[in-house]
Amino acid sequence: MEEKINFYSENSFKLDSEASFKNWIKRVILSEDKKCGEISYIFCDDKYLHKINLQYLNHDTYTDIISFDDSMGNQIQGDIFISTERVAENAREYKVGFEEELIRVMAHGILHFCGYIDKTESDSALMRQKENEKMKLFHVEQ
């Protein structure tokens, strides 16, 4: 399968400089010794993501991200749904910019595809460390 990164929007959100994000995502994947397959980011609102959470995961909660991993072997692929409403809310709560929080969440989805989980406190700590590491790659010159 060819390397392909897609961005879709189910709300009014538009990702600025898609090429920069695609290059960064590829660097994140390579930094984990993985290969890029087809990855789709779908930006949506809370209501849209809540419906997916209920329908596919049977969770009646709001969340910032849901990822559906279709990775095969060393090739990363799948769909990552992100609520831009929740990202904005979390950015305010953590007192960071929207783009910084968005980059964290986008990295989080890729890290799940790389095999990282966040079910326990120690898993969450490792995930946060990896997110911080991958966020720094965003600012590396293209």
Image: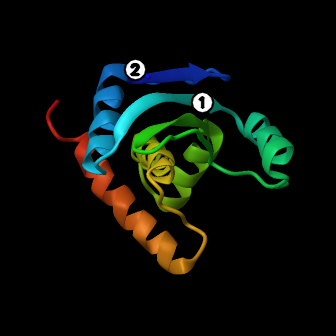
Q: Can residue 124 be seen in this view?
A: yes
Q: Do the residues labelled 1 and 2 touch (CB within 8 Å)?
A: no
Give residue 24's quadrant in the image: top left
Q: Which residue lies furthest to the front in this view?
A: 73
The C terminus lies in which quarter of the figure? top left
Q: Is mark 1 on a helix, strand or loop?
A: strand
Q: Find disc 1 in the rendering and name its residue.
A: 43
Q: Which residue is drawn at 47% across and 51% down?
A: 108
The amino acid type, in three-letter code, at marker 1 is Phe
- Residue under circle 2? 2
Number of numbered discs on residues? 2
Q: Position of residue 16 (x, y in %)?
A: 40, 22
- Structural crowding at the residue carrying mark 2, measured as other residues with C-alpha within 10 Å and reported as few (<14), some (14–19) or many (≥20): few
| First-in-chain label (1 vs 2) | 2
Q: Indicate left or right for 40 with 18 as reference.
A: right
| Residue 126 lies in quadrant | bottom left
Q: Is residue 40 left or right of residue 49?
A: left
